[in-house]
Amino acid sequence: MTTRHFLSTQDWSRADLDALLAQAAAFKRTKAGRELAGKSIALLFFNPSMRTRTSFELGAFQLGGHAIVLAPGKDAWPIEFDVGAVMDGEAEEHVAEVARVLSRYVDLIGVRAFPKFQDWSVDREDRVIRTFAKYATVPVINMETITHPMQELAHILALQQHFGTSDLRGRKYVLTWTYHPKPLNTAVANSALQIATRYGMDVTLLCPTPDYVLDTRYMDFARANVAENGGSLSVSHDPDSAYRGAHVVYAKSWGALPYFGRWADEKPIRDAHKHFIVDERKMALTDGGVFSHCLPLRRNVKATDAVMDSPACIAIDEAENRLHVQKAVMAKLAS
Ligand code: CP
């Protein structure tokens, strides 16, 4: 039997996702459970985290399980991912052994591995988590690589609970690029595009120039989701027209794909679009819209204090939901 992983929401049916969201809502009402009693999860962090680490560890504990956190290259051996590599560099062991050994110890493996930002054609292969999934004999969960599926579920649950309905069709959804002093990965933007179209919303991707449009894989997923679930997809470079009448504004900064590996060339474009900040003036153009962000967020760079502290901001609800949706995913995969 093949092992079922959670690498992307696109691999799971709408019925599966709806069931996970229903289970997450139930966990939100009653914290404790025994779904992971006697079970364990290894959480491998190749990059920093606050929310993901806390909510996975706590979620496993609340379901009677145990989480082991590892930072390869820091408190665990550096890992090689190339098949056939002559391992005479930094790595002390190969993912083939790491994934197989961990599979003998634990029931689930979570992996956070951001792209390297030098060559998008390499990053888009998502090699770290894909090789873990290849060699592991227990389910592997994506804790953010080139997408962030746990954030997707937490985001949709927050919207459903805010609007008081599981049906988000007809909502005008703006995924807006925001300024950040450094180029960031496209994971959350890819994810927001996927999940907003999956739930049938009318989605506008708002970004500075055509260079900031997301990878064709995610644009194609979004178009396929629209064909299957209704709603629409458009691209805009005009903040005011995109915000006008919106019900949801979701913000993220990301680096333009054509500039991967030559970020100094991208910086002048980025710096010329600081006005993409989410502020009170733009939010006033919406139709009483809500604002959210995956966090962490640089205040007064990505969004103003006034927006972050307004009743329209549901970013804290979304962050809380990470705990509930991850419990639902762990319980499902470990059952
Ligand atoms: N949103 C999110 O994944 O937060 P962390 O990077 O703190 O885990």
Image (tube, grey):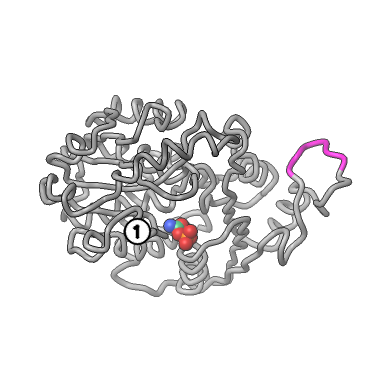
Main secondary structure of the magenta stretch: loop
Q: Is residue 324 above or below residue 173?
A: below
Per the image, label 1 sits on a secondary structure element best described as helix
Q: Is residue 45 left or right of residue 160?
A: right
Name the residue rendered at 39%, 28% in the picture: 219
Taking depth in this image into account, of 164 and 264 the one nearest to the observer is 264
Residue 2 picture quarter: top right
Callout 1 crowding tier (Cα within 10 Å): few <14, some 14–19, many ≥20 = some
Q: Is residue 72 above or below residue 172?
A: below
Taking depth in this image into account, of 199 and 24 the one nearest to the observer is 199
Name the residue rendered at 23%, 59% in the picture: 307
* Image coords of residue 289 (percent x, y): 16, 50
Q: Is residue 46 visible?
A: yes
Segment tinted magenta in the rendering:
81-86
Q: Is residue 165 above or below residue 215?
A: below
* Image coords of residue 313 (percent x, y): 24, 59
Amino acid carrying label 1: it is Gln
Q: Is residue 1 visible?
A: no
Q: Quick one: quadrant of the N terminus? A: top right
Taking depth in this image into account, of 147 and 205 the one nearest to the observer is 205
Taking depth in this image into account, of 178 and 229 the one nearest to the observer is 178
* Image coords of residue 47 (percent x, y): 59, 57
Q: Is residue 18 above or below residue 238?
A: below
Q: Is residue 98 left or right of residue 27?
A: right
Q: Which residue is mark 1?
A: 23
